[in-house]
Amino acid sequence: MTTSTLSTAQPSTNHKLFADIADLSGRIGLAAIFLLAGVNKIQNYEGSAQYLAMGGLPEFLLPLVILFEIGGALALIMGFQVRLTALAFAGFSLLTAVMFHNNLADQMQFLMFFKNLAMTGGFLVLAAHGAGRFSLDRRKSTV
């Protein structure tokens, strides 16, 4: 096969299945940290409220943060409104990095800051690419 033939060849069924499974796994992986964080905030509500206040945000926002983290994570896992949810999580991750992990002289905060930047990138790719085959978004578009 020539190079031009290779570039126009259709992906194999195995490649498509791998891509579909990777889409689902990626959504679950990105969602997991927020689902666990939201549940943790419920379990440690007072400490979470204090941490929010340390970042300069009013404590009354905590229920909204919890709802966003858990609801958004579940939406990602189910593949519902993935592009919009991914964009929202990209902004949330970037904002969190800047507001709560900005002491880059502290090794842990340095790592947390760049973890959030990496998640922002992952969410932007997800927003651009979409939910994939195993999703409610795909199911809606084919019904």
Image (cartoon, rainbow, N blue to C red):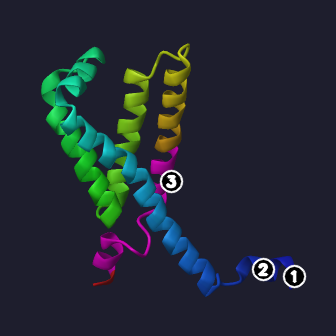
Picture quarter with the N terminus: bottom right
Q: Which residue is mark 3?
A: 125
* Disc 2 target residue: 6
Label 1, label 3: how far apart the Cα atoms are: 31 Å
Q: Horizontal placement of 19 versus 98: left or right?
A: right
Q: Is residue 122 above or below residue 65?
A: below
Residue at left 40%, top 74%?
134
Magenta residue span? 121-141
Which residue, as the protein is rendered here, is positioned at the far left?
60
Sequence order check: which comes first, mark 3 or mark 2?
Answer: 2
Q: Is residue 137 left or right of residue 121?
A: left
The span from disc 2 to disc 1 (Cα, nearest Å) is: 6 Å
Task: Check disc 3: other Cα within 10 Å, few if <14, some if 14-19, many if 20+.
Answer: some
Q: Residues within 10 Å of mark 1 (few under 14, many from 20)?
A: few
Q: Position of residue 116 (x, y in %)?
A: 47, 36
Q: Earlier in the sequence, mark 1 or mark 3?
A: 1
Q: Quadrant of residue 88?
A: top left
- 128 or 109: nearer the eye? 109
Amino acid, disc 2? Leu
Under tag 1, what secondary structure?
loop
Q: Secondary structure at mark 3?
A: helix
Q: Is residue 46 magenta?
A: no
Write down the residue under mark 1: 2
Instruction: For the residues labelled 1 and 3, say whether their Cβ atoms are less than 8 Å apart.
Output: no
Whole-percent x, y for residue 139 in the image: 31, 78
**Which percent across, then down, holds residue 64?**
17, 38
**Quadrant of res 140:** bottom left
Residue nearest the viewer, comparing 53 with 136 = 53
Pointers 2 and 1 in contact (C-beta within 8 Å): yes
